[in-house]
Image: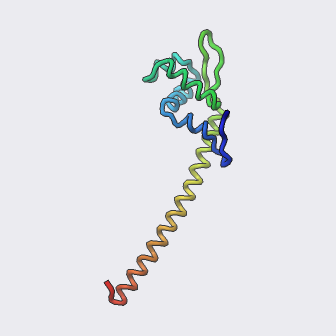
Amino acid sequence: MRTIVTEGVDDDLWSAIGDPTRRRMLDLLLSEGHGTATTLSQRLPVTRQAVAKHLVVLDRVGLVRATPAGREKQYRVDDAQLARAVAQLSSVGSAWDARLRRIKGIAESIQRVQRAGVAEDQEDGVG
C-alpha cells in the first residue's frame, strides 16, 4: 500500500520521516544499534504504546526491521532504505537549488531592467 511518486520521491517514506518523534527514534536506533518499544519509550517523552505505533509506521515504510526478542520485537534501522531516503533528500535538494538559482537569475534580471529604467529617467530629467 506504499505510494511512490514518479519523480523518485516516496511520499509514505517522507511522511514517516516527517514526524519528529520518529526521527528521534531513528536517531536512537542508529546510535544504539537496536531497541525495543520499551527501551525506546524510556528515552522519549511518549508512552510505550505510542512508540509501538510509531515503530509500525517506520516498519511499514521499510526504515526499520523487527526481529522477535522474547516478548518484544527488536528493531534495527534498515541501512539500505535509509540510504534510499538520503538519496531522495539529496535529489530533492538539488532540484530546489536549481529552482532557486533560476528564481535568483530572474530577480537579478528584473533589477537590472529597473535600474536601467531609472538611469534613463534621470538622463531625461524625469523624476
Horizontal and vertical percent position of residue 65: 64, 24
Asked whether, in this view, residue 79 is left or right of residue 53, the answer is: right
The furthest residue to the bottom: 124
Horizontal and vertical percent position of residue 21: 48, 29
Q: Residue at x 67, y 33 (%)?
A: 1
Asked whether, in this view, residue 112 is left or right of residue 54, the answer is: left
Q: Residue at x 58, y 28 (%)?
A: 57
Q: Nearer the viewer, residue 112 or 54?
A: 54
Q: Nearer the viewer, residue 62 or 90?
A: 62
Horizontal and vertical percent position of residue 123: 36, 88
| The C terminus lies in quadrant | bottom left
Asked whether, in this view, residue 82 is left or right of residue 41, the answer is: right
The furthest residue to the top: 70
Which image quadrant is residue 70 in?
A: top right
Q: How many marks?
A: 0
62 relative to 116, above or below: above
60 relative to 110, above or below: above
The furthest residue to the front: 1
Horizontal and vertical percent position of residue 61: 63, 32
Q: Residue at x 56, y 20 (%)?
A: 35
User: Which of the colour schemes (rainbow, by chain, secondary structure, one colour) is used?
Assistant: rainbow
Q: Residue at x 55, y 54 (%)?
A: 96
